[in-house]
Amino acid sequence: MAGRGGCRRGREQLELERLGEAARAGSCPPSPPLSACSRQAWSRDNPGFEPEEEEGAAAAGPVLEMDVEWGSPAAGASSSLGSGAAGQGGGGRRQRRLPAGRGGAEAPSRPPVPPEGAAPHRAAWAKRLARRLRGLWGTRLMEESNTSRERYLKSVLRELVTYMIFLVVLCVLTYGTVSSSMYYYTRVMSQLFLETPVSKMEKTDFKTLSTMDDFWKFTEGPLLDGLYWEMWYNNKTMAENKSFIYYENLLLGVPRIRQLKVRNGSCSIPEDLKDEIKDCYDVYSVANEDTAPFGLRNGTAWTYTNEKDLNGSSHWGLIATYSGAGYYQDLSRTREVTAVQIASLKKNLWLDRGTRAAFIDFSVYNANINLFCVVRLLVEFPATGGLVTSWKFQPVRLIHYISTFDFFLAACEMAFCLFVLYYMVEEILEIHIHRLHYFRSLWNCLDILIIVLSVVAIGISIYRISTVDMLLKKLLEDQNSFPNFEPLAYWQMQFNNIAAVTVFFVWIKLFKFVNFNRTMSQLSTTMSRCVKDVIGFAIMFFIIFLAYAQLAYLVFGTQIDDFSTFQDCIFTQFRIILGDFNFTEVEEANRILGPIYFTTFVFFMFFILLNMFLAIINDTYSEVKSDMAQQKAEMELSDLIRKGYNKAMIKLKLKKTTVDDISESLRQGGGKLNFDELRQDLKGKGHTDAEIEAIFTKYDQDGDQELTEHEHQQMRDDLEKEREDLDLDRSSLPRPLSSRSFPRSLDDSEEDEDEDSGHSSRRRGSSSSGVSYEEFQVLMRRVDRMEHSIGSIVSKIDAVIVKLEAMERAKLKRRDVLGRLLDGVTEDERLGRDNEIHREQMERLVREELERWESDDTASQMSHRLGTPLGLNGQPRSRNSRPSSSQSDGIDGAGGNGGNNIHV
């Protein structure tokens, strides 16, 4: 082994000499900084000291991994204007030349070669611009698979900040278009037309209309009184030919009244009843709609007009869905003329048995709050007779960009459009990278849905703004026509719905970023784990639920309004589960099946199935919580933010560096400093347990949980070297670095490239010793072998300690056995027992102890053959509670070299 080690060292020495000669000849690339090498060794020995930057360095390679050019090796070599070392040093690697005045010999450098033409310079500039532009859309899905945790979280943090700005802009837009004035506007208008009685002697209002006569009373009373406010309360006349409802709301144009009819004979009459029943009018449908003239047969009130000519749209009523066509009458701008028109319609029987729906439409505008209110009152005449009323009051803001706040909203709209365009490009790039795998993530599908909804909302908004200008222009030209704001109100309602859904999904997407916190991710993990159990439970739940819904619909559907349709039955049963029910109505509808239905439904649904669902969620949550408690702690967004804050405080000299904190703790420690004291001191200065434990484990060589004076001195020496490296880097670099001077990142390299735009090769800092990259690799291999050898020695020392513990344990056993024998002899002499019996007992005890010792020796020998030291209870043990990386490597190495174990 000694011969092999000597040969290996000889080969390495020859290799180092050859590399040194090549460096002196000028054929070797410039060397990396020695300070970076020493800091890399520091971070490798202390994996927990700076875990984030350590992971970033390990993900990309050794110390020089930040010098890798993103282009291909050929491109990196062709773009290098330096000494030609790029092709020799590993494809696309380009190094900084050694600066003068760093101590030691300077590395030779060649003067930069000027470019042959402007084309390569423009190509490099275009390449840098393209890289910068692509960096704007850098997300987690665009990162390399081997990206460090810190760089990954930086992408997440940047993505989160951008998304929060987008969320704020969207909320300002949506909430800026809605105000409490809309509610009060709807309230006062509905009170005026819905709650006013038809006469002073009757309490019937629009909501409680029951006959056609009540309908005509409403049109002649509350409708006219509400539409035409021509007199002040002191009987003074208001503005001529204008009506201001509540003195504030201008009636736009004229109101319109429209009806839809079905033709006679649209249903079949049984043969036995044809003599008694001559006319038959079916329920409303487009196929049964009557289009023939009737009554006076002149004017639009008596002749049919199709939907296209009326520019109407279908309406979903309580009984049926009605088309936008029919027979209509435009009323007047004055109360007197309108009263005459309504009286004429009533006199000539405008409403008859074939009438299935009557619409009253009008629009008002309030300039005080810049709101339109589109009103539609609907009276449905079902085939069963009687009336069913419904209404719709839609306050909309159709005129934009008047006040200062409106212009602020316009700026937010522009920002929203830019954000949508930004996210469209981002999703296109991600789809281009991941292809169909992109759609396997639910969050990615949610991103696509948000973009689609946003584009649709933008299109509706543009259509609405362009249409309202045309409509208002037409209204101003002819004020005696009916302004059909119904399509605009419809699109406004769709816009509000889309905006509401978009805001909902945008808020839900925040879970995508919150899940990076271990506590917050418990919800999503719990739901994903129990999804199969929940689906199985849902199938069983809805089988029973729908069975009860069918039963309730068939038994109570004809007598209880809440069970009148199958959909109402479903919603009513959900209300029963939540405790909202009326048992009296159920019991009165069916005195036998009613109580049985209610009792069994509550028992099975509430007491059994609902508690089963809660048990599934609780069990899964407990499993998730226990699993997360056992997971290894990783760097989180909060840690990254805290680290950035600490770096900023250090740069501003408002906080000491880690090196200064440790040095101060050592100075205050005196002769000895235990782990608890160091941990308490450094924890108070903002350092993590991982950093403190890594430092202490490295220098606590004897494992006694205390640092001796020698260990103190070794740590001081290393810290002084580290401080010198930090000061050297600060003096050589154009901008200050953080307290931990690790290899520079790609972003730093790109900034240096922009500063030195006249040179195509980026410069790197170098050290005074001139150690090249290949020499650094040889030294790295030497250090790794040394660590392996030290680990093997540590494992052997552990084996010796275990054997000594076994010997001490055997001594205690012998002492115990001898004590028992002496006690037995003394007891026999005192009691005068037979010596033969005493001798047999002694022989039996000695034989048992010998067998026990032999079994212990056999187990100890087997453990040493396997290379695994055993503790007091026969379990594998470690030297201390915090093994270092070298110790763990040594234990592994000892397993492969069992013959080298030391046996005492």
Image (cartoon, rainbow, N blue to C red):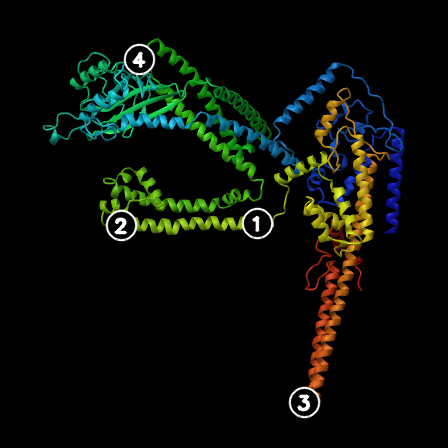
Q: Residue farthest to the front? A: 234
The span from disc 1 to disc 2 (Cα, nearest Å) is 47 Å
- How far apart are the two marked residues, 1 and 3, measured between alpha carbons? 64 Å
Residue underneath mark 2: 595
Q: Amino acid at mark 3?
A: Leu
Task: Please state which amino acid type lies under the numbered disc 1.
Answer: Asp
Label 4, secondary structure: give it.
Answer: loop
Q: In what element is the residue under mark 1? A: helix
Which mark, residue 75?
Answer: none
- In the rendered structure, are the residues bearing label 1 and label 2 in contact, judged by CB atoms less than 8 Å apart? no
Q: Quadrant of the C terminus?
A: bottom right
Q: Nearer the viewer, mark 2 or mark 4?
A: 4
Mark 1 vs mark 3: which is more N-terminal?
1
> In the drawing, does residue 18 fall left or right of residue 127?
right
Residue 831 circle label: 3
Q: Is residue 397 above or below residue 903?
A: above
* Sequence-earlier tag: 1 or 4: 4
Mark 4 — residue? Answer: 239
Could you classify mark 4 by the number of other residues whose Cα lies within 10 Å: few (under 14), some (14-19), or many (20 or more)? few
Cα distance in 3D space between marks 1 and 4: 76 Å
Label disc, if present, on residue 627 of the rendered structure: 1
Observer-side mark, 1 or 3, equals 3
Residue drawn 82% across the image and 52% down it: 709
> Mark 2 vs mark 3: which is more N-terminal?
2
In this orientation, which residue lies closer to the viewer: 20 or 462?
462
